[in-house]
Image (tube, rainbow, N blue to C red):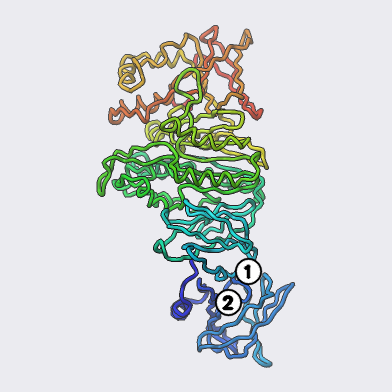
């Protein structure tokens, strides 16, 4: 925060507050003088109307002001704790307050304060003294428009990268930094060093690794960063995406978000050991631009839902987090930047370097004041951000350490054809190469993405892996609304990913909201499914959707087949199916098919029960994590065993004929 408030104004304000506040209140002056009002006690003989604050954060040699009646020049204030003691001489500059200078050699502690005047003494109370660095020690530099200090307690932190999103510098030996910034982005931020967390206010859920710049481009302003030590070599990530809260009354999205993800993730955080921190990444689309104005629910409205979240939350911007009245990417980001700061940034936790990128460029044709545009986007990383990224990657010393990059739109897709080839998803495809071309030096890179509301784990190369995480809001809350079945477009349950990081070792699992962690797949008796989907009315309905052909999704599926949706699958998983009786192992074939339960819970229900709307963006999508087995009998029991890449085993005994309805979920 800036440290340029005028001390005399602050003192006047504090005096007024002393007269207005009830007993028990205290005030702190951000200009550097810490003010401690007092209260009167019946038997006091030296000072009255005072109160000692529970804690005081100050730096050695700082001037501290106490408020109260009766202080005199030469009063001696004694600080005593179990290990340290010191005394200071008071200067009574006015009837209602007196000041003293903290000694240069002061130590932190919880002190008892006693006031002495000659042979008389008065116990004033107890106070915790927390030491910090002097923020006013950062000098000016020619050309610098932003300056500050990065520190932890009384320790300056050298070598920390600080940026305005365009240019980057590092702190010097004293923790000081200067930026010759044009303040184009409207903020300044740091790349958190390993072993530290950003001090947050007013809640821990929103880390204070950035500050909004307020002044004109050519005017100097100061922004300091106070960090707290936290051993995070071992930590857990909760990774979620696509929340799309919009205050929709029919969807009850806010209620579902609170009782679903927020409640479940909060319980998880609180259940973990305090020596293993948990961090939460939200990969964009927290809000829904279409409803910013019609529902009066924008990105700040979403932010208000996070007050009680118990761990640090790191956000990146999604395409739906832009102002829909603005047809300019930079300007449409303004509200987001005020709410959550930088749209791209980096930090370090343990041995992992994290980078969060903004790869949705808002076009929004037709948008103007009072008019929502088409909300169109392009998917790539703009040149200014790309240059910042190059510099950030170049500063990483250990290229063998894990590098995790979060972004909203996926860089690849693997569900375009039956070869399941990982194909570039940026527009044009060369834009994907611009990103991946910067990553060849690194041996362990994980891309985390969202946007498409379905799960996909893609091994791009020996050193590059993309994890596309299905959505928290499933199909924009429609599954829950229509059938109480929160199901994503590929059949994945609404949920999030959990990543366990221990040094350079990383493991992960998809966690469905409201379900046990071992729920990792779903099976379908296709005889039952096909009996429903061969209904002429359903065929005619599905044929209305683009890329749906004649509407017969399962016409090529053999009789007596079983379809298995393994939503967190990657090529190192194993799927084994045996048929009772013969106990023979059935051949398992990977297929590109839609999940029938999603089609039943969304397309069919919305058409028949709500508004007969065709929404291609919400429709079931062909998935690359579907598998089929052909059996010898329509009535045999199957034993399905799925083993993930880390050796965890998930099993199901499937008895047929099998039913098909939302109870399968």
Q: Which mark is residue 52?
A: 2
Q: Which mark is residue 72?
A: none
Residue at 43% over, 57% down: 183
Pinpoint residue 169: horizontal percent, then vertical percent.
Answer: 55, 55
Residue at 58% over, 90% down: 72
In this view of the protein, which residue sits in the foreground, 109 or 570?
570
Classify mark 1: helix, strand or loop: strand
Q: Position of residue 171 (x, y in %)?
A: 59, 59
Q: Quadrant of residue 508?
A: top right
> Visible in this render: residue 369?
yes
Of 160 and 104, the residue lying toward us: 160
Up-down: is 492 above or below 40? above
Tag in front: 2 or 1: 1
Quarter location, residue 244: top left
Query: Is the residue 282 above or below the residue 334 in the image?
Result: above
Q: Residues within 10 Å of mark 2 (few under 14, many from 20)?
A: many
- Residue sitting at x 31%, y 41%: 364
Q: Which mark is residue 131?
A: 1
Q: How far apart are the two marked residues, 2 and 1, measured between alpha carbons?
A: 17 Å
């Amino acid at each position: 925060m800036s440290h340029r408030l005028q001390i005399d104004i602050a003192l006047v304000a504090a005096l007024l507050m002393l007269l207005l506040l009830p007993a028990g209140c205290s005030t702190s002056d951000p200009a550097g003088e810490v003010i401690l009002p007092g209260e009167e006690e019946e038997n006091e003989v030296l000072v009255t109307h005072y109160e000692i604050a529970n804690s005081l954060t100050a730096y050695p040699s700082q001037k501290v002001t106490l408020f109260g009646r009766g202080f005199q020049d030469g009063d001696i204030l004694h600080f005593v704790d179990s290990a340290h003691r010191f005394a200071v001489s008071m200067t009574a500059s006015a009837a209602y307050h007196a000041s003293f200078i903290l000694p240069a050699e002061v130590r932190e502690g919880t002190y008892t304060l006693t006031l002495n005047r000659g042979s008389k003494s008065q116990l004033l109370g107890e106070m915790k003294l927390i030491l910090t660095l002097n923020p006013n020690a950062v000098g000016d530099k020619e050309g610098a428009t932003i300056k500050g200090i990065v520190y932890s307690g009384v320790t300056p932190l050298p070598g920390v990268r600080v940026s305005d999103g365009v240019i980057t510098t590092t702190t010097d030996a004293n923790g000081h930094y200067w930026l010759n910034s044009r303040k184009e982005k409207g903020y300044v931020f740091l790349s958190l060093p390993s072993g530290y967390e950003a001090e947050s206010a007013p809640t821990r859920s929103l880390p204070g690794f950035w500050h909004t710049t307020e002044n004109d481009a050519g005017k100097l302003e100061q922004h300091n960063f106070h960090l707290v030590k936290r051993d995070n070599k071992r930590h857990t990530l909760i990774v979620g995406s696509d929340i799309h809260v919009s205050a929709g009354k029919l969807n009850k999205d806010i209620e579902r978000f609170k009782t679903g993800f927020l409640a479940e993730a909060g319980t998880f955080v609180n259940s973990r050991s305090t020596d293993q921190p948990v961090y939460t990444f939200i990969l964009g689309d927290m809000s829904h631009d279409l409803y910013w104005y019609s529902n009066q629910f924008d990105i700040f409205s979403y932010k208000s839902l996070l007050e009680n979240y118990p761990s640090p939350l790191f956000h990146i911007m999604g395409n739906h987090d832009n102002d829909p009245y603005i047809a300019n990417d930079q300007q449409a980001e303004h509200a987001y930047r005020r709410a959550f700061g930088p749209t791209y940034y980096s930090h370090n936790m343990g041995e992992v370097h994290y980078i969060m990128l903004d790869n949705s460029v808002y076009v929004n044709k037709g948008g103007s004041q009072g008019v929502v545009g088409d909300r169109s986007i392009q998917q790539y990383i703009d040149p200014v951000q790309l240059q910042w990224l190059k510099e950030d990657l170049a500063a990483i010393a250990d290229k063998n350490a894990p590098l995790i990059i979060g972004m909203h739109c996926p860089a690849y897709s693997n569900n375009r054809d039956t070869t399941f080839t990982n194909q570039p998803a940026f527009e044009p495809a060369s834009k994907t190469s611009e990103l991946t071309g910067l990553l060849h030096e690194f041996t362990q890179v994980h891309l985390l993405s969202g946007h498409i509301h379905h799960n996909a784990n893609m091994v791009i190369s020996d050193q590059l892996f993309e994890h596309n995480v299905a959505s928290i809001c499933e199909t924009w809350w429609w599954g829950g609304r229509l059938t109480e079945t929160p199901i994503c477009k590929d059949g994945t349950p609404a949920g999030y990913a959990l990543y366990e990081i221990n040094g350079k070792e990383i493991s992960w699992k998809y966690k469905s909201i409201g379900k046990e962690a071992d729920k990792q797949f779903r099976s379908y008796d296709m005889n039952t499914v096909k009996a429903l989907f061969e209904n002429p009315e359903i065929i005619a309905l599905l044929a209305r959707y683009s890329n749906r052909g004649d509407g017969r999704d399962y016409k090529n599926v053999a009789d007596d087949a079983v379809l298995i949706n393994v939503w967190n699958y990657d090529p190192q998983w194993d799927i084994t199916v045996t048929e009772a009786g013969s106990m023979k192992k059935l051949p398992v074939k990977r297929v590109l098919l839609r999940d029938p339960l999603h089609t039943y819970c969304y397309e069919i229900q919305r058409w028949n029960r709500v508004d007969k709307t065709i929404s291609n963006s919400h429709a079931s999508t062909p998935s690359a994590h579907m598998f089929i087995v052909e059996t010898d009998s329509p009535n045999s029991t199957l034993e399905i065993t799925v083993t993930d890449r880390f050796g965890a085993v998930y099993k199901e005994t499937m008895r047929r004929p099998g039913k098909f309805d939302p109870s399968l979920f």
